[in-house]
Amino acid sequence: MSPISLAMFLGLLSCSAAARTLKATTRTPSTQTFFPPNSFQTFEGGVDHPLSRRDDASLADSATAYVQAQLQVNSSAVTFKSGYASDIVQYAYVKQQHNNIPFVNSVANVAFKDGKVVSFGHSFSKPTSIASSTPSISIDAAVAAAEKALNGKYNNIPATLEYLVNSDNTASLVHVVQIRNKQNRVWVEAFVDAHSGQLLSTIDLVADAVYRVLPIYKEDLTEGFETLTDPQDLTASPLGWHNDGTTSFTNTTGNNVVAFYNELESATTNQSAPGLVFNYTQDPDLEPAQGMNIDASVTNVFYIINTIHDVSYRYGFTEAAFNFQQTNIQSGGIAGDPVLAFVQLDEGFDNSAFTTPPDGQSGEMALLLWDQTIPMRDSGLENDIVTHENTHGITNRMTGGGTGRCLQIVESGGLGEGWSDTMADWMEQSGPTIVDFYLGTYVDGGVPVRSRPYSTNSTINPYTYSSLLDSGEVHGLGEVWANMLHNVLAALVGAHGFSKTARTDPSGTEGNVVFLHLFIDALALQPCQPDFLQARDAIIQADQNRYAGANKCVLWTAFASRGLGFKAFDYTDDFTVPSGC
Ligand SMILES: *[C@@H]1O[C@H](CO)[C@@H](O)[C@H](O)[C@H]1NC(C)=O
Ligand SMILES: *[C@@H]1O[C@H](CO)[C@@H](O)[C@H](O)[C@H]1NC(C)=O
Ligand SMILES: *[C@@H]1O[C@H](CO)[C@@H](O)[C@H](O)[C@H]1NC(C)=O
Ligand SMILES: *[C@@H]1O[C@H](CO)[C@@H](O)[C@H](O)[C@H]1NC(C)=O
Ligand SMILES: *[C@@H]1O[C@H](CO)[C@@H](O)[C@H](O)[C@H]1NC(C)=O
Ligand SMILES: [Ca+2]
Ligand SMILES: [Zn+2]
């Protein structure tokens, strides 16, 4: 069996498990979109493509020519969707098309380095029948059908006409419309058959953090607050954090994020004193909405999201790589999409979420209160939760070229949860000994929300690749991946030391710098709907691209230590490394 069909198999397994346990399943319509099997190849130093010898070939031309040659299709079947160059690699994302209409779920991605192809992923299909490319029903009729079926409202984002490959390998012509229901936290792309008017399926744009609820444990939150002066990184945010490219603000509005109380975009937090001073003292004895506590939390959330913007920007989550900014300073990407942060959102308790629409539309972070303690606790004051949520935006945007559609199958969603925990883990490590990491210790009254800490000690965290079979739920899968990456981080830091300036200086050679480069680079390389094996391969290829494979054996050894070794397959652990390591 190929890794691909395995991924789908795991997806099926986990659907039934998810239906039993997850809040997400009551929120999400049960109309998941089919994704054709994908494949992913990495080529170490690279292979030639048809236009290799043409110096003036554009990224779009090189990518479409390569895909045509590999898949033996002509130019009418391939369209360039997006692409950009990082400091070392050029990434291209293309789609299958028919009669100039692009496919939703048959896509490809090609990465080039020094004129050679270093990786290629695709989920192109050969449908047995393709619906007529002239719609029989109007967009208005499609909107009405989707609103009715999903009990939500069309949000007026312009509809598109696309082809959707179905599980029976036919291709339907669909109107794609976004439907929201704020009460139920539904926000989906809906695919409505443009001939029959039937809602065929949806893509869920919301990534939830669903946390385990454990006994109450009171804890004071005075530790941790510090007064920071000018934390903004002017390389990543040349306008600072309070200018959106048009206007200067003295509240928590800026180019990267607008942070505000509840759902009132007008309820940003004002400076407490002239000169952009935001000095609000949180009082742990008061409820989150009392005293200065709202302003303290909004200020913290604004600071964290801006910091994540700046750190991830330094490592490659730039405008061209489909990031979140109101105004794009560097070229590439679509502007007008700062993160909107809803602090103390009044839509339930004990949760938080991040929704990632395509590049050009704001990501939305929903931070709820936790009612496990008295007074209640505010997830905006737990940095690892804000970081976790924000990282969903990074991974959903960078995988597959800015569509927000490429971490949808359960195994890919599990990777997404893992990366989100890992980013928080990375942010909180402070020295050359990589310490165990507990996600979510504050909101839940002092009890971590994950089942185990991430650890290099396999007594403390025994999860391996085969543990995926024990969990059908994205956060459970994510724990396995985050524990592997914790071990990869520890191995790289063990090999190359630790940089205390890694958050602002990506030029170092230390292990934590190397780790974050590989983390970000691999997102752009991996295919749409990656599985664990493909995500691992993308990290190893990213090392080839950036460091000429200098860390290849360190990486293999770390992955192999947690069962994702050279011969790992079909959720069976393998602890071996390739020959030469
Ligand atoms: C591409 O192939 C399709 C059938 O596979 C054919 O109908 C079409 O004419 C071809 N177009 C070009 C530009 O060669
Ligand atoms: C922030 O302050 C500006 C005035 O400086 C105001 O126009 C704007 O509405 C405030 N932002 C929000 C989102 O409330
Ligand atoms: C922020 O300041 C403006 C003008 O100084 C004021 O109108 C607004 O009510 C303040 N907003 C909040 C949330 O206090
Ligand atoms: C912040 O406010 C407190 C009082 O609430 C004050 O003691 C402190 O000096 C202020 N800090 C700054 C930097 O303004
Ligand atoms: C791993 O954790 C176990 C349980 O806490 C402990 O007994 C053991 O000494 C640890 N091993 C190492 C190498 O630290
Ligand atoms: Ca953008
Ligand atoms: Zn999450």
Image: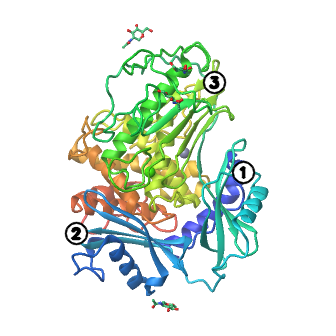
User: Which comes sooner in the sequence, label 1 or label 3?
Assistant: 1
Q: Is residue 40 visible?
A: no
Q: Secondary structure at mark 1?
A: strand
- Distance from the alpha carbon under mark 1 to that under mark 3: 38 Å
Q: Quadrant of ligand 5?
A: top left
Q: Residues within 10 Å of mark 1 (few under 14, many from 20)?
A: some
Residue corresponding to mark 1: 153
- Identify the residue at horizontal 31%, vertical 51% (top origin): 517
Which is closer to the viewer, label 2 or label 1? 1
Residue 474, placed above or below residue 197: above
What kind of residue is marked 1? Lys
Residue corresponding to mark 3: 216
What kind of residue is marked 3? Ile
- Distance from the alpha carbon under mark 2 to that under mark 1: 47 Å
User: Which comes sooner in the sequence, label 2 or label 1?
Assistant: 2
Which is closer to the viewer, label 3 or label 2? 2
Residue 440, placed above or below residue 71: above
Residue corresponding to mark 2: 114
In this orientation, which residue lies closer to the viewer: 138 or 468?
A: 138
